[in-house]
Amino acid sequence: MNWRAIRAIVRKDLKVVARSKGVLLPLILVPMIMLVVLPGLVVLAPAATDLLVTPLAGMDGFIANMPPGLQAELAGLDEAQRLVVLPLVYFLAPMYLIIPLMVASVIAADSFAGEKERKTLEALLYTPTTDQELFLGKVLSAWLPALGVALGGFVIYGLVANLAAWPVMGRVFFPNRMWVVLVLWVAPAVAGLGLGTMVLVSSRVSGFQEAYQLGGAVVLPILLLVIGQATGVMYFNVGLVLLLGLLLWVVDAVLLWFGGRTFRRSDLIARL
């Protein structure tokens, strides 16, 4: 395996991403909204005491319909603290997974489809690398930035949540063990799901937008998790997060195995 060639492919793809506003802007704006704006808005709610009469009045009944494990997690907190912890620690947890999924998907969609649009794919395919090295380079060029954004976003989210909620909580309450497992175990697997799907799609279509639209369905499982937790069907705990990560890693392994087996530069050259 020629790791020097693989690193060159990764560096080239990252430079292209840094120069493309259409690719770079979503990678900045979406994490900023989800990790800075949303937690700030959540924390403002308990501060607006005049607006809390109705929400707080129904909070006990709402929590009573949640899973017993979540009720135990919230025991000992007052109403205002529950109104902060419930969305910041639990409801926004599955939404956080959209970030590594989106970053990996956007970059992977640009990996081959974008090369076709820029008329640079043919030169890349004729470089002295094996099919496996080229495929691995494209995979890493999407997976590594997704991990970086996910980890950096987690740190920013934790700082914003703890600082903004300090008047209500009076202590550092984030992260808990579930979030640590979510970031270190599930987020890399979600990024792998996005890139594994999008690399397969983008290598078979003619443009970035077409690849991104066709691969957009991969976000549906994450949306189902958001809905499931918001409706009380389940809640994110350490056990569920470990199981979710395991399932995602199995799917990733299948996708990447299939992608590596079916990727042939001769097929791409034939479609130029």
Image: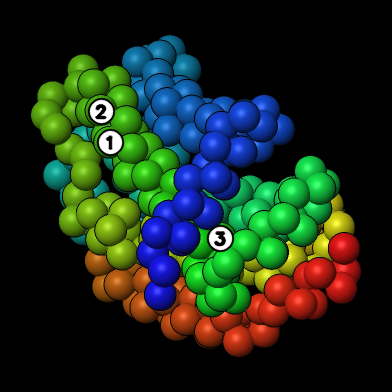
Classify 10 Å Cα crowding around label 3: few (below 14), some (14-19), many (20 and above): many
- Look at label 3 and name its amino acid: Lys
Q: Is residue 116 left or right of residue 103?
A: right
Q: Is residue 191 left or right of residue 272?
A: left
Q: Which residue is drawn at 67% across and 84% down?
A: 262
Q: Which residue is drawn at 51% across and 62% down?
A: 137
Residue 96 in view: no
Q: Residue at x 87, y 63 (%)?
A: 272
Q: Do the residues labelled 2 and 1 touch (CB within 8 Å)?
A: yes
| Relative vertical location of residue 110 with respect to residue 44 in this rendering, above or below | below
Q: Where is residue 166 in the image (x, y as percent from the top left)?
A: 20, 22
Q: Position of residue 42 (x, y in %)?
A: 42, 28
| Relative vertical location of residue 12 with respect to residue 44 in this rendering, above or below | below
Q: Where is residue 43 in the image (x, y as percent from the top left)?
A: 36, 24
Q: In this view, does 103 lie to the left or right of 210?
A: left
* First reached walking from the N terminus: tag 3 or tag 1: 3
Q: What element carries label 2?
A: helix
Residue 145 in view: yes
Tag of residue 155: 1
- Look at label 1 and name its amino acid: Val
| Relative vertical location of residue 69 with respect to residue 169 in this rendering, above or below | below
Q: In this view, does 39 lie to the left or right of 205?
A: left
The residue where tag 3 is placed is 138
